[in-house]
Image (spheres, coloured by chain):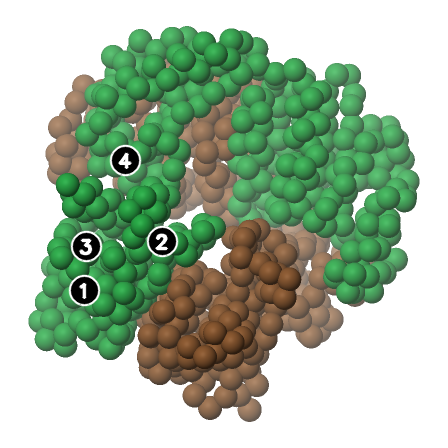
Chain colours: A green, B brown
Amino acid sequence: MNNDKVQASIITIGDELMIGQVVDTNSAWIAQQLNIAGIWVRKRVSVGDNYDEMWKAMEQESVDSRLVLITGGLGPTADDITKPFLCDYFGTTLVIDEGVLRHVQYLFDSILKRPFIERNRKQAEVPAGCTVIHNSRGTAPGMLFEKDGVIYVSMPGVPHEMKGMMEDLVLPLIKKRLVTGNIVHRTMLLAGIGESYLAEHIQLWEEALPQNFKLAYLPNQGLIRLRITGSGSDAEKLQKDLSEQFDALKILVQEWLVIDEDLSMPQVIGKMLNARKKLLGTAESCTGGYIAHLFTREAGASDKFNGSVISYSNEVKKDLLGVTRETLDTVGAVSEETVTQMAKGALKALKTDYAVATSGIMGPDGGSYAKPVGTVWVAVGDKHDLMTQEFHFRYDRMRNIEMTANAALNLLRKFMIRHDS
Amino acid sequence: MNNDKVQASIITIGDELMIGQVVDTNSAWIAQQLNIAGIWVRKRVSVGDNYDEMWKAMEQESVDSRLVLITGGLGPTADDITKPFLCDYFGTTLVIDEGVLRHVQYLFDSILKRPFIERNRKQAEVPAGCTVIHNSRGTAPGMLFEKDGVIYVSMPGVPHEMKGMMEDLVLPLIKKRLVTGNIVHRTMLLAGIGESYLAEHIQLWEEALPQNFKLAYLPNQGLIRLRITGSGSDAEKLQKDLSEQFDALKILVQEWLVIDEDLSMPQVIGKMLNARKKLLGTAESCTGGYIAHLFTREAGASDKFNGSVISYSNEVKKDLLGVTRETLDTVGAVSEETVTQMAKGALKALKTDYAVATSGIMGPDGGSYAKPVGTVWVAVGDKHDLMTQEFHFRYDRMRNIEMTANAALNLLRKFMIRHDS
């Protein structure tokens, strides 16, 4: 379906990727940006700080891709071998770029307030003949090369430096240089249905999809995103066809539909809170601040989120949320009674319109026969009414925390919808 | 340095990786496990759900790697093309595996409690002649193939299913099959120094490193991890040489050394709290629960972490932490006075030995001339004494939150060390 697209490869470089000490978030971000621009990423490659592997990767990617984006290995330290490698690969030599040198000196003098040492001069070296790309957020410049009809752009591996460079300079430049077709996506979020049952449910619709459309299932943390991707040369017709397919799919899955946009569950709740001009607070035991973090990591959180009591210990549940000693002693912290009292306590202490309360056993230890690892109680509600639900997850600790957060927010979503009428 | 190692490739498959809708965490985890086992990952590759790209990737990786691990594309849905692809690639056909069929039926009947539908039978199909690898956490089995001296293992893309399969079956199997040399790492964590200054500082030591050793700089969220990697056939000598190099480096960087292990900052603090039998609580405004989450996502959090007040709004700062109206009205929420009162309030409300308080402007909006985006105040301490510090970060919102968390915990570390004596 993507034969009419400009094909791209992303190469990330660094031994830290080969031993798994860091997760490569750069590739995903770059891929997103290229897709929006109508460029299809056909391959992502990571190699270590190894000259031969870098060479082989560059040669292999040049065969099928017209654009090769490279990140990593451009810092000032001895384990960075990318710049000399690029010189050899493109048959050139390193020269000092005066613009980069002034920028690096300025950063050290005025922003970093650290002495400019001889080694930092190396950061101003670039392969002669490349197009230098300014790094407004750091010292290492980007570099653009062109050879046999393929465009290569090398950028630093530090995510926020790479992102600034891509947004400000690289994306506009490659959009202008590479004639592109159209690629469009629409995504919806579903909750409360398994992947295989869903696939069976929409099988006939999916088999009837036109050739230039494709459906992807993206299950994550108890939710499923469904994404339709289409490509074509006629932008207007493509959008119209996409809308028709998307609307038909929405009707088929309406029972489980959370939202018909590419939003996360916290973003959906945030949108609902803003529309109702309501504030949320959380009382978190087993999720330990994760739900609060999901809201506060988004800009503009303060118009929907007031705060939380993270009551990891029973003392905090009693002192700040008013859970009774009797409840904790008889039915325990992981119970409908406790989360009910936590939610009521949060509404009062945090003075919010809605509250979400969680208590559960996230594992790997702490389970019992009556309450195995993965047992979770959730309460959601307002000052008039509460809804509670018990869940049983069976994954590792972090995944249980994530699933609990999504399940709790989905219950709040149902509560809000039910109480709208 | 790794010529004597078994070389491996990791191939992850899925259009969702090509458009960047999910971050590939599987590759990093697999790479970690292989490294511990003494297998060197020379390349990581991601391709879309595309037959030709999958074929090319398999052919290319077979040339230089003796082990090829594949994840993704093994679910029950129509966009999974991996199984038929593997059949073609290894010249075989799909057959129902009775063991897998019984397992899938059992899962649907007893665990998922969903009807077993015809489409689910497909999950029990495997290429004839492969070694079936049991999936204890899900329905899709793993498959092992061997061809021309290369071992291929295909696993599902769902992280917790893949991890269970790797730990229980794949790693023991490939360790037994592939004779391996020794690869060793040691990592230390530094705070308060820039990468280029550090490189200059240890240049002579680094240049004198023996051929079979290598140093990597892993800067992350305001901290730097330094990792020495060594390889060799004599395990005992290798460990001894590594210790000597590591100890020499420690002396050189002692001014910035946080810990001589591969731990995160929250893990370092957790270890210090456990050693002192002390409890921590947090009062978080700008970090919004992120510090609480860093502690509670680790198992065994309850013996060091009591809870938090996430005081995102000024009302919660007043009501639950006792920050005065006067302070908020005069010097504002982002000030030394406010975080001091927040820390004191947290010690009292949460009844903990130590408290960490944060307040700042994380961006992208909310900055002013006097307090630009990135301005952060932190207070740490116990009931006898407090330490405060102002920081200025200049990154995107999530990174500012992460940097604040690490900076706040590093200040708490200094506080604890200072008050030990």
Say whether disc 1 or disc 4 marks the residue closer to the N-terminus.
4
Q: Secondary structure at mark 1?
A: helix
Q: Residue at x 79, y 21 (%)?
A: A147
Q: Is residue B31 left or right of residue B87?
A: right
Say whether disc 2 or disc 4 marks the residue closer to the N-terminus.
4
Residue at numbered disc 2: A304
Task: Work out how far the residue at label 2 is from the one at label 4, CA to CA, in angstroms.
Answer: 19 Å
Relative image position of residue A186 (x, y in whole percent):
40, 25
**The image quarter in which residue B176 lies:** top left
Instruction: Say if A74 sits above or below B256 in the image.
Output: above
The numbered disc on residue A258 is: 4
Instruction: Say if A394 sits above or below B102 in the image.
Output: below
Type of amino acid under label 2:
Lys
The numbered disc on residue A344 is: 1
Q: Secondary structure at mark 2?
A: loop
Task: Work out how far the residue at label 1 is from the one at label 4, CA to CA, in angstroms.
Answer: 26 Å
Residue at numbered disc 3: A381
Q: Are marks 2 and 3 in contact (CB under 8 Å)?
A: no
Task: Work out how far the residue at label 3 is from the one at label 1, CA to CA, in angstroms.
Answer: 8 Å
> Dot 1 surroundings within 10 Å: few (below 14), some, or many (20 or more)?
many
Q: Are marks 3 and 1 in contact (CB under 8 Å)?
A: no
Instruction: Say if A240 sits above or below A290 in the image.
Output: above
- Chain to which mark 4 belongs: A
Closer-to-camera residue (B235/A180):
A180
> Dot 2 surroundings within 10 Å: few (below 14), some, or many (20 or more)?
many
